[in-house]
Amino acid sequence: MRIASFVYCISTAAALSTIPVVTKKPSRFLLLGGAGRIGTAAASHLLLRDPSSQIILVGRSNDGSRAVEEVRMDHPNATVSYEQVADIWEGEGPSVDRLKSLMRESDCIIHTAGPYLHRKPTPMKLAIESRCQVYVDVSDPLPYLETACLMNHTSVTTTCLLSAGAFPGMSNVMAMEAASYLGGESVHDVRFQYFTAGLGGSGPLNLYITNLGFGEPMVQYDGGQLRFFTALSGSLLGKVNFFLNNASRSIGTSGFGNEQARQRVGSQPVFAWPFPEAATVATELRARGGSTAAMGTAPGIWNTVLAILVKLIPRPWWRNETFSKFLADFSEPMVWATDKILRASDPAGVGETHAMRVDVSGRRGPHISIVQAHDSFRQCVGQSCAEFALDCLRYPAVGVELPERRYRDPIAH
């Protein structure tokens, strides 16, 4: 079997600070969910790439001073403001009127205000109606993506990119790049494996979204067919190496490298979770075998506890937003304490370590593995989302797309 290995290593936003963004005028960014941890991370990265950018953070709270101060901490001279919008998911009413007004004045809309489950893509619809240049979000439920993609028609003048975070998002692009190295060999299997220490710095919302996901069926390829596995979500699948043995090629020789990934992350247990890329990427690649998506967290006891809870609690309960929110709120103090311990024991003092491993194999045996690692899941999602938005501004392609379609050609972008 021929095995090719690649390592992507971006430890901090500074790794990208030397890449200039060429724009005709300062871009105006509207960040929905801008008061959240992911939103402020995306805003900070946009300002790192182009300090002249104008940032508008949108949130439900009547006080966004903390979010503005967080962004200005590293960018004291930045143009950052906050706007309160009570509900960005409404189809009509004062909130919608205010939101559309802000959208019409913006070049790019970045939507990180999850969860997206049981929602309709109203913010994207409003962005299209406002004729904004670019819309980017970090949506992940498959029904949401299917509904949003149905809105792709010839009258759309906005470049819309869905699932543009870390996973899904960067992971989708990694899979497409891995497939491009198969040398024309048809794709057989696609595997996505993720790890995040604690909450990854993303806040309690991430815990809530994870809980909701346990109620959803796994949608993935099996024997070349797209299938639904209701009882698979939350099941422990085994251990995954989030580093590469005998890597034949390393991309990036500084920062959080393969050996650091081995030391900081190593091998971790993972459980099945209904990430859409197991279905959407495998469909795009026409996988003839199987696809899976799994994630793990630290400390490992959390994986075991979640696996037990998933077996004991009926699936409909997890799908219930009230129950999943209650469970997230109930366990938040314990997770918060765990995050404090992780931060204290982390050599980098971050405690938000994140890693991804994507494996793509060909029908006759070639196997490509790509590993990406980062000091902070929150920053990784923010950076990824910001970079996708900047790329869409520079290379517009009107319509509604997923990353695997936009970046199918590894040379085009």
Image (cartoon, grey):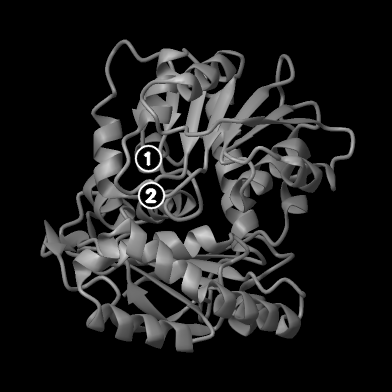
Q: Residue at x 17, y 73 (%)?
A: 231
The residue at the point 45 percent across, 56 percent down is: 167
- Residue 222 point in image, percent of width and height: 14, 65
Q: Is mark 1 on a helix, strand or loop?
A: loop
The relative height of residue 198 versus residue 102 in the rendered view (above or below) is below
Left or right side of 322 for 222: left
Provide the secondary structure element on which disc 2 rests.
Answer: helix
Question: Does residue 210 appear in the picture of this structure?
Answer: no
Return the disc, 2 or 1, that comes first in the chain's sequence. Answer: 2
Q: Which residue in the protein does label 2 denote?
A: 176
Residue type marked 1: Arg
Q: Residue at x 54, y 72 (%)?
A: 332
Q: Looking at the picture, how far across and down is residue 238, in whole percent?
A: 34, 85
Q: In this view, does 151 lie above or below 197?
A: above
Q: Do the residues labelled 2 and 1 touch (CB within 8 Å)?
A: yes
Left or right of 135 in this view: 10 = right
Residue identifier under label 1: 408
User: How many C-alpha atoms fall within 10 Å of the one at disc 2: few (<14), some, or many (≥20)?
Assistant: many
Where, by quadrant of the figure, is residue 124 drawn? top left
Q: Where is residue 316 in the image (x, y as percent from the top left)?
A: 20, 65
